[in-house]
Image (spheres, rainbow, N blue to C red):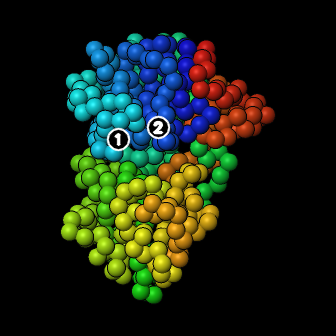
Amino acid sequence: MDVQFLGGAGEVGRSAILVNDRLLLDYGVQSATPMQYPVGDVAPEAVVVSHGHLDHAGAVPTLLSGDRRPEIHWTPPTAALTRTLARDTLKLHGGTMQCPFTQTHVARLGEVECRHGYRESFEAAGHEITFYDAGHIPGSAHVLVDDGDTRLLYTADFHTDDTRLLSGSTARPAADVVICESTYADVTHENRQSVEARFAETTRTTLWEGGTVVVPAFGIGRTQELLMVCAAHDIDCYVDGMGVEVLDMLREHPAFLRDADALDRAASHARTVTGRDGQRKRIAAKNTVIITTSGMLSGGPAMTYIPEIRTDPTNRISLTGYQVEGTPGRELLETGRCELNGGVRPVAAQTALFDFSAHADRDGLRSFLAAYEEATVLVNHGDTCGEFAAELRAEGVDASAPGVGDDCTVR
């Protein structure tokens, strides 16, 4: 089996892997300025998309330009999420070099897509494919690829621990080769129950003191998880941004959730923000909790709320996920200042990071790979791929960390 890494190797973003020159696994973007896309000019017969995040699915519509019409295979939630992301990208960057696709390309997705559930094998570009629940976001999948000679397992992004929204990944299908993500290969997550308890306690304390809590959260997965946390702890909240649309969509796919009834209760527990007639500024002045995009403060409704609450130390900003270097969220954590309204301004409001990660940490990765001690392991999707591969090699695993553009023959 020939495997070529077009992106996502030794980096986080623009995941794209070409198998046997015919089958493409993911086709994402890297959210930099300008956006970065997978390398090379690819024309696959079929595309398999692991899940609906920008770094794995954000460039899929570009594959439908001209007269190209490869089949696109994904789960139902991934199909819906990819469209949501594409519409958002068009809204923000349509007609610019940042967005090399149009609404016409997005509409073509409906002409070529094929939707599949977990553990339902199907054929794509001469390969047998099977999806397994990856526990990362709703609809996320490990992808097993069998060309008749070699069985390759592409983990994509995955989580091994249960969250309120999803059950952790438990499937370990037999494979000769594993392409394994390594986002948190050098990190041990705090126990999820402890994170949740600390989040609830600090939120209640701020509300008791009369403050406002802004909770920046990623629109896909994280917003819905935080709504369930607030509902479980009886914390009243508002929800704003892309997460509202995603919440409505996920409720249409209960089979891909751990507890669909609990998500329904959380949705009923929260008040939705429309953003009309200065609503956001009025809400920011209330003694309340606001869950809103974007998770790294790089745009979205969060950047309306935070300027309103930043000068009062009674208020709180609770970041809920990893803050990429160079983002306003990272700057806020490290310096107490961030770019707001066109300038870098100090933030007196209390700021803390709560690790609600949806990725396996070091222990989760090692636990997963323990089932593949005899397999060849190709480490990707991380900032320390080489180091993690070297660690595995020292323990006798046939492991390596390809770079972008590398072509590997595996058996």
Q: Amino acid at mark 2?
A: Met
Q: Secondary structure at mark 1?
A: helix
Q: Are there few (<14), some (14-19), or many (20+) residues within 10 Å of tag 2? A: few
Q: Is residue 242 above or below residue 312?
A: above
Residue in front for this viewpoint, 44 or 357: 44
Residue 298 place in picture, x, y as percent: 45, 54
Q: Residue at x 44, y 17 (%)?
A: 42
Residue 36 appears in the picture as rendered: yes
The N terminus sits in image quarter: top right
Give how far apart the Cα atoms at labels 2 and 1 are: 10 Å
Q: Residue furthest front?
A: 342
Asked whether the residues under the numbered discs 2 and 1 touch, taking CB atoms below 8 Å apart as contact, a structural biologist would say yes
Which mark identifies residue 93?
1
Q: Earlier in the sequence, mark 2 or mark 1?
A: 2
Q: Secondary structure at mark 2?
A: loop
Residue 289 place in picture, x, y as percent: 37, 73
Residue 69 place in picture, x, y as percent: 29, 18
The C terminus sits in image quarter: top right
Residue in front for this viewpoint, 316 or 18: 316
Location of mark 2 (residue): 35
Residue in front for this viewpoint, 62 or 180: 62
Q: Residue at x 73, y 38 (%)?
A: 387
Q: Residue furthest bottom?
A: 209
Residue 235 appears in the picture as rendered: no
Q: Residue at x 48, y 56 (%)?
A: 296
Residue in front for this viewpoint, 181 or 169: 181
Q: Residue at x 50, y 19 (%)?
A: 40
Q: Identify the image quadrant of residue 391.
A: top right
Q: Are there few (<14), some (14-19), or many (20+) residues within 10 Å of tag 1? A: some
Residue 257 place in picture, x, y as percent: 34, 50
Left or right: residue 191 compared with residue 49: right
Q: Amino acid at mark 1?
A: His
